[in-house]
Image (tube, rainbow, N blue to C red):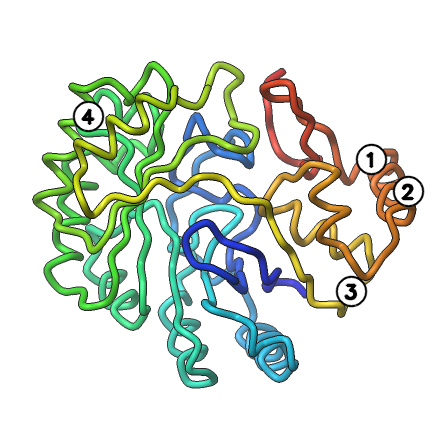
Amino acid sequence: MKFIFGPVASRRLGTSLGIDPIPLKTCNWNCVYCQLGRTQPLKNQRVAFISKKEFLGEIEKVLSLPSSKEIDWITFVGSGEPTLNSLLGWMIRQVKKLTTIPVAVITNGALLYKSQLRKELIHADAVLPSLDAGNAFLYKKINRPWPSITFERYIAGLKSFREVYRGRLLIEVMLICGLNDDEKSLIEISDILKEINPDQVHISWPVRPPAEVWVKPPERERILLAKSIFGEKSLCLFSIDEQTEFINENSLNETILGIIKRHPMRTAELIQGLKHWSEGEVLGTLIKMEQAGQLKKVHRDKTWFWSVSKTIFPF
C-alpha cells in the first residue's frame, strides 16, 4: 500500500486506519519533539502529491476486506503535515462516500487561517490540531514554523475554524520538560484553549525519539498540573503499546517500511505487531534493511528505535 497503513492502536482514536497523503517530512513546522526527525527544508506550498486513481484504488480495496469491520476511525495523518496536500478535501469526501466509518484529520493546525482549508475540513468527523505554546516566543522555540505562519496568524486560524466547525475538535498539547510545563506557560495555553473552546484537550508528551536530543518528557507532577489547569475537558494520553494488524497485502520489507515511515518503533513492538511473520523473519529482515540503507537505529532516552534512513536525527 502506498498511502494507507495500519490499522494501529491509537492513543486518541482506538483502532485507526491511517492515510498518509504526504511525502516523508513534508512539513511547515520543524518541531523539536517530532518523532520523524528534523524538517529540512521546511515546505509550505499545497500540492497534489497523489494520484486520484491510485488513492481510490487503495481505499476501495482496504474497505472491501473483512478486517475493515474492526476499524474505529479512518485517519488522515501524514509523515509530514497532511493539509499540505491540496487534494485533502476531495479525499475526505471520497472516503465519506465509501463508508460510514468516521474520518479524522490530525494536523498541526498551522494553515487553518486559510478559508479554503477550513471549508475542506468541515467534512471530517474530527479534527485534531496542536497547541504547544501560549506565546510567540515558545511557539518559535518549540514548533519552529515557516516564517509567515506567525503565532498570531496560527491562533486566529484555530479560532476561526472553531467558529464554523461542527465536528469534534480535539486539541493536543505536547508537554516538554523545561519548556512549556511550568505553571505560567500552562496558564497561557489554558487561556487560549478557553477562547477556542475545543471539545476535548489531549495532554501528551514525547514517547518516541524526538528530533532534538535534549527534548525530554515532563515529570509526572507537571502532567497532573497541566490537567488541573486545563480543566475537566482535558485527558492525559498515557502511552499504550502499538497493537498493529497490518493489511497483509505487501512483502515484509514493504510492510515494515510502511509503518516505520510514520511511527519509529522498537524491535519488540515490530515483532508483536507483525504477526503474519515469525520473530526470526522480522529480525532478519530488519538487519538486511539496515545493511541496505533502508532503515537506521535512533537512540533516545536509553532506548533504540527503528526509523527510515532518510530521517534526520542529530546524535
What's the mark number on residue 136? 4
Q: Amino acid at mark 4?
A: Ala
What's the mark number on residue 284? 2
Can you tell which of label 2 and label 1 is closer to the viewer? 2
Q: Is residue 178 above or below residue 103?
A: above
Give me the residue at 66% from left, 45% from top: 260
* Mark closer to the chain start, 2 or 4: 4
Q: Amino acid at mark 3?
A: Asn
Q: Dot 2: few (<14), some (14–19), or many (≥20) neighbours within 10 Å?
A: few
What's the mark number on residue 279? none
Q: Are marks 1 and 3 in contact (CB under 8 Å)?
A: no
- Between the C-alphas of marks 4 and 1, the distance is 40 Å
Give me the residue at 50% from left, 20% from top: 212
* Mark closer to the chain start, 2 or 1: 2
Q: Are marks 2 and 1 in contact (CB under 8 Å)?
A: no
Residue that mark 1 sits on: 290
* Mark closer to the chain start, 1 or 3: 3
* Mark closer to the chain start, 4 or 3: 4
What's the mark number on residue 250? 3
Q: Are marks 2 and 4 in contact (CB under 8 Å)?
A: no
